[in-house]
Image (cartoon, coloured by chain):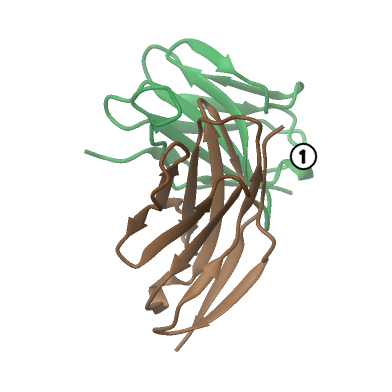
Amino acid sequence: AQTVTQSQPEMSVQEAETVTLSCTYDTSESDYYLFWYKQPPSRQMILVIRQEAYKQQNATENRFSVNFQKAAKSFSLKISDSQLGDAAMYFCAYRRVNDMRFGAGTRLTVKP
Amino acid sequence: NAGVMQNPRHLVRRRGQEARLRCSPMKGHSHVYWYRQLPEEGLKFMVYLQKENIIDESGMPKERFSAEFPKEGPSILRIQQVVRGDSAAYFCASSAFTGTSEEQFFGPGTRLTVL
């Protein structure tokens, strides 16, 4: 069974600093996608970034980038130049075909 | 192009009542997914539907829960005889096509509270 683990229930970062959120997953498949979603207090799920497993190059979206280590089944999210608006719950997710699994989330606090 | 719509946003039911949650996918999307989020947890897959078909209901509790996506109208998640443990946020997502690479677009969720 595919499982997604986020080992950091809470993280804190100073505004303008960099923070890394960890995620590991378990799968026997070779073709899948990985995602990071942001859930602000409004509870809307917002896609932050996604990574195709067959691509070795790490995905980047502006201040957000990932460190994808396929062999280690690790998929961490790096947020650079943190902003107050980045404060939210962050969920890592794994998807293969229609099977999408989420981690338990990491609550990110941004200190001014 | 409106996003995924869910209503109601908040629903309060007493134990034993029925809850009906509605989801209107994005225009042009024919694939709908329902997820449940318990407090302080991630989203858990419940069911995947296409128009008039349930494709995968492996995450749906066997009793009291049902889902449909009729030819016309929104997708409905129905919970009969609700219990306190059903209190959660229920999210709907839609996609244009099926497959690993297809992005799912999420609605704002319905927060169900069972008294």
On the question of residue A56 being in view, the answer is yes
In the foreground, A79 or A72: A72
Looking at the image, residue A45 lies above or below residue A94: below
> Badge 1: few (under 14), some or many (20 or more) residues near its Cα, within 10 Å?
some
Looking at the image, residue B29 lies above or below residue A74: above
Chain containing mark 1 = B
On the question of residue B24 being in view, the answer is no
Residue A79, percent across and down? 43, 69
Q: Name the residue under label 1.
A: B15
Which image quadrant: the N terminus of chain A?
Answer: top right
Q: Is mark 1 on a helix, strand or loop?
A: loop
Quadrant in which residue A106 is drawn: bottom right
Callout 1, which amino acid?
Answer: Arg
What is the residue that sits farthest to the left in this orientation? B1
On the rendered structure, is B79 left or right of B68? right
Looking at the image, residue A48 lies above or below residue A97: below
Which image quadrant: the C terminus of chain A?
Answer: bottom left
In the foreground, A2 or B49: A2
Residue A109, percent across and down? 54, 77
Quadrant in which residue A11 is drawn: bottom right
Quadrant in which residue A82 is drawn: bottom left
Q: Residue at x 72, y 42 (%)?
A: B14
What is the residue that sits farthest to the bottom in this orientation? A112
Q: Which residue is drawn at 38% across and 36% down?
A: B103
On the rendered structure, is A98 left or right of A15? right
Residue B38, percent across and down? 68, 49
Q: Which chain is brown?
A: A
- Numbered disc total: 1
Residue A95, percent across and down? 53, 35
Q: The green chain is which one?
A: B
Q: Residue at x 44, y 32 (%)?
A: B23
